[in-house]
Image (spheres, rainbow, N blue to C red):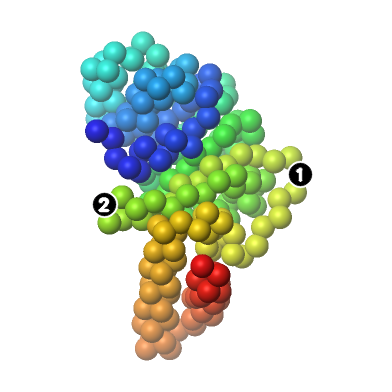
Amino acid sequence: MISKRIEEIINLLDRCNTLADIGCDHGYVAVEAIKRKIANRVFAVDINLQPLLKAKELSKKENVDDKIEFLLGNGFDPIEGSVDEAVIAGMGAENICSILSRAKDRIFNTTLILQPMKDVELLRKWLFENGFDILKEKVIKDKNRFYVIIKSSYLPEKISFSDKDIYIGRHILDRTEEAYEFLLKMKEKMKKIIGMKKKSFLDTSYEEKVLIMIEEELKKW
């Protein structure tokens, strides 16, 4: 049984010829993509051997190992050529940005499904500043934890984006219950940080700016 988080990542994938599952962990995305005929071939990549072996084990169990290539390495490095779609999930935004930066010249025609575990605003900022638009963004709650999943692709023309697109995101457009709850949690987090910083006489201008944006959005619900 795959988690809600993995299910939502898979739901954002388009039918494609080649898919890269970067940081494949146990291989759930890679295996399901083949089983559901989303991809014809998958490159399952991980920087550590142990997860890769577990992914291989699962693929054999599900009888799809002949359509998955297991590669040990960092990001897109061990993959030869380009891929149609790529999933990078379950790691920090800083790590994801580093992987994307290393492969920037190779992913102009790749649709990206990205799920950072923290610092999502860093990822949004990197995408916009490097010519990648956010096509879809979804907030989900799985086992009492919120996850932001982003679908992105490169656009040759200049991308227009706002501070709100970076710090709050475009998931608010869907007006889901989970997005609303996520914004409430962000609001409480910002208020808590502001309180702590003020006690230490530290600058709170960034948090106050984000808090105003959050409150403005909550009023529209």
- Secondary structure under tag 2 reads loop
Image point (39%, 64%), residue name:
181
Distance Cα–Cα, label 2 vs label 1: 39 Å
User: Which numbered disc covers residue 157?
Assistant: 1
Image point (37%, 37%), residue name:
7
Question: Is residue 117 positioned above or below 46 on the image?
Answer: below
Horizontal side of 169 relative to 198 (left or right) equals right
User: Which numbered disc covers residue 143?
Assistant: 2
Percent across and percent down for residue 69 are 39, 18
Question: Is residue 205 positioned above or below 166 on the image?
Answer: below
Percent across and percent down for residue 50 are 24, 30
Q: Can residue 44 be seen in this view?
A: no
Q: Which amino acid does label 2 sit on?
A: Lys
Q: Which amino acid does label 1 sit on?
A: Glu
**What crowding class fits label 2: few (fewer than 14 Cα within 10 Å), some (14-19), or many (20 or more)?**
few
Query: Does the CB distance between marks 2 and 1 fall below 8 Å?
Result: no
- Secondary structure under tag 1 reads loop
Sequence-wise first label, 2 or 1: 2
Q: Can residue 151 be seen in this view?
A: yes
How many marks the image carries: the answer is 2
Percent across and percent down for residue 28 are 32, 30
Residue 195 sits in which quadrant? bottom left
Q: Which residue lies furthest to the top in this view?
A: 66
Image point (56%, 56%), residue name:
173
**What crowding class fits label 1: few (fewer than 14 Cα within 10 Å), some (14-19), or many (20 or more)?**
few
User: Which numbered disc covers residue 95?
Assistant: none
Question: Is residue 181 positioned above or below 88 on the image?
Answer: below
